[in-house]
Image (cartoon, helix red, strand yellow):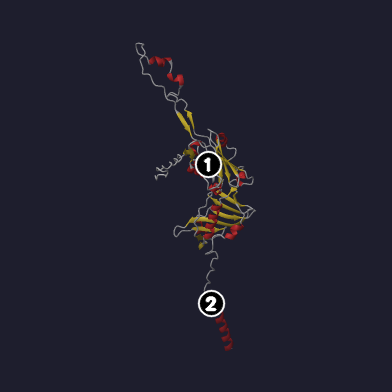
Amino acid sequence: MKLRSLVITVVVLAVLSAAAYFLQRPVPAPAADTRLGQPLADRAAIEKAAKLRLTDQAKTVTLARQPDGTWRVASYFDLPADFQKLTRFVDDLTDAKIQRLVTTNPDRIARLDFKDTKIELLDSAGKTLWSLTLGKNAETGGGRFVRFDAEQKAYLANLNVWLDAESKNWADSQLLDLKPDDIAAIELPFAAGGPLTVSRAKKEDPWTADKTPAGQKLKPDKISSIVSSLDALRFTDTTDLTEASLAVAKPHSRTFKLTTFDHKTYTIALARKPEEKKLKPPTPSADGKSGPAALGSIVDLAKKTGSAGAEKKTDEKKPLEPEYETIPAGPGFVTIASSDSTAPVNALMQKRAFQVSDYVFTNLPQNAADLFEPAPPPPAPAKPAEKKPGGQPRKP
């Protein structure tokens, strides 16, 4: 009986010991977040994506990969994307790393300003493959708070990126991409004397003109300036091809032609409505009348005469000078046509009307005389050496 009681006691103590150990055992350390220390975005995932979508302040930019590997701005008339800008943006994403898990608390997450600032990778069907929402910048230590997809986790990443949500800014603004050494000839339009062509046989040769005035020569720096204005044209904005300002500008076009050493021709039409001065309409008098009515009624005229009925003499007033108002020049447009039917610029011109900076117009010569300067006089002929008596030439 005593043995049985002892066994029961031992069993009870064993159960109690096991329970105590179970209740007091150390809590295992939470598993480390696998994202810590990893790049914010995986470059391989970006390379597989068919679209990149950026959203900020209710504006959205969509870039789409083409079958040939190039990108276009789908949200801006499908114009070619600025590849260098896209590359810098991708580098910023892949170089940034997740530094730490900030919080999983919904209240704290709400205070980190996660709104509509978002970066997304999509497949060709528009399905989201990867999504990152950006919060505010960290106040101390730098970096930015981020969230993946719709997770209830906020991380801090050493990300320093500006999310440009203007679609136009992602388009490649370069319309023509030639090098100065590519240009063999330039045809320049002038109102007086017609077009003038400057050319060279090889890139290292000096430029020559087909119509050089007597006693003049080309200004090399002037030709270099013309080349730099035309060989790498960029647009500043685009408008619809039916835009009224384009129709107004076209009658004032100047057409330049560049010919390259590989015998391709680029026809460049620059159009801009010039500055205009207009006569101002006559200013109404204080009572709102103008012209003869401004003189008043017969009674008003009578009051201006003297009491004896004799008209007071008044000084004759000089006629007023006409006043003009200046209407500034309109926006400048460029149209480019390549002799190579496969050149991308030909298709580009069918999409939009492209505006260029005023500098392009002001930097191009308006008169052929601007291209020339006086040529140095030819060297004087050498004097024949004098002869000494006896037929020997005298030393000079």
- Residue 333 sits in quarter: top right
Secondary structure beneath dot 1 equals strand
Tell me the quadrant of the picture where the N terminus can be found: bottom right
The answer to whether residue 111 of the structure is visible from this angle is: no
Residue 371 point in image, percent of width and height: 49, 39
Q: What amino acid is at disc 2?
A: Tyr
What is the C-alpha distance between the residues marked 2 and 1?
100 Å
How crowded pointer 1 is (Cα within 10 Å; few <14, some 14-19, many 20+) is rated as some
Label 2 residue SS: helix
Badge 1 amino acid? Thr
Mark 2 residue crowding within 10 angstroms, few (<14) / some (14–19) / many (20+): few
Where is residue 320 shown, x and y percent of the image? Answer: 42, 24
Q: How many marks?
A: 2
Q: Residue at x 48, y 43 (%)?
A: 221
Residue that label 2 marks: 21
Nearer-N-terminus badge (2/1): 2
Compared to residue 329, the image places residue 175 above or below, namely: below
Which residue in the structure is indicated by mark 1?
Answer: 208
Q: Is residue 13 left or right of residue 291?
A: right
Tell whether label 1 touches label 2 (CB within 8 Å): no
Q: Which mark is residue 2?
A: none
x, y percent for residue 286: 42, 24
